[in-house]
Image (spheres, grey):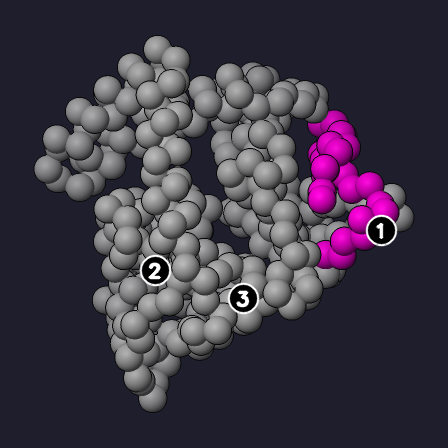
Amino acid sequence: MKMMLTAISTIAVLLLASSSVTSASAEVPSWIKNNAGWWADGTIDDDSFVQGIQFLVREGVMKIPPTTQGVSSSNEIPSWIKNNAGWWADGSIDDDSFIQGIQFLVEGGIMKILPEQASDVATQATQKTSSDKSKSSGSDSVIASLEDELEKCSEIKKSYKRLDCEKPIKQEILVHTYKTGAELFQVGPINYYWFGVNSEGNEFEISPTGQPILSVRMLAENTSSDILGLNCTSPAICNYDVWDGSKSFKYSGMDFTSGQINLNPGTSKEFNILFGPNIGYGGTQFEYDSSKSYEFRISEPFGSLNIHLDLE
């Protein structure tokens, strides 16, 4: 299962690696770090890493911008890139340092993306940067104060100390953004915050091959005085799925570390789940029928809830 999870998520890393050429600063979803760690420690081999990316580009799960590529007769990945992946996974280096290693693979011809499978996302990256700046300028005083603190962290020269400074502030910004803008769903002692379909991280689209792709991103907050866990150990055994009224669809990728997200009392965690191609191990291929109504289902021991998905 881990091999396919890495296949699903490393393509997202490549997308960001390519787009970083046209962006001064790259952002990589934190959930990809779990999978980078699996690759770095040898759980996933080099060929699986490369083939997974090529498969997902072909399926249109992610679209890669045109990139100058070299020619290579080998899929062998240099050990220093694996080291970078491990360091990035544990927070020792920043996103850009890891992305540079992925770009090296593309430029060296180790990872090959066909031009006809690529789409230019440079404009999207520029639009996102402009959008982020616009949101920031119009945000409330709490966000403004936190952003001032974050700016001070950038003055720290040692990367690991800078990351230690930035991490809790970024988490505060994230939580505040969800609590002031997202819809709240209470399931027992856990509060789920969700911005809905067609918000950042919550996309629905049909790939060029006809495969429906649905991404779900939420924030879960533990309001109890106990340590609680969100559980999803495999597609076959997962407390989260999509339901169309007669059939349930299992995930294609997710970021539950070792099948669980543990939440200490009063803490929050953002998580992502992808529904699309069947990855096996009890998984299913996501299907879309415009005549049906779809729901995202939560079925934890502490409570259950069905959330309507407005898919169009």
Residue under label 1: 247
Q: Does 94 appear in magenta?
A: no
* Residue that numbered label 3 is attached to: 56
Nearer the observer, 107 or 301: 107
| Amino acid type at mark 1 | Lys
Q: What element carries label 3?
A: helix
Image point (59%, 45%), residue name: 203
Q: Name the residue under label 2.
A: 18
What percent of the width, then of the height, locates residue 302? 71, 27
Amino acid at the residue labelled 2: Ser
The amino acid on which the numbered mark 3 sits, given as a three-letter code, is Leu
Magenta residues (range): 286-312
Q: Can residue 38 be seen in this view?
A: no
Indicate whether residue 298 is drawn in magenta. yes
Q: What is the x, y in percent for residue 146?
A: 30, 19
Structural distance between the alpha carbons of marks 1 and 2: 37 Å
Report the Cα–Cα distance between label 1 and label 3. 25 Å
- 10 Å crowding of disc 3: few (<14), some (14-19), many (20+): some
Q: Nearer the viewer, residue 269 or 204?
A: 204
Query: Which residue is drawn at the image coordinates 25% and 59% (left, top)?
Result: 100
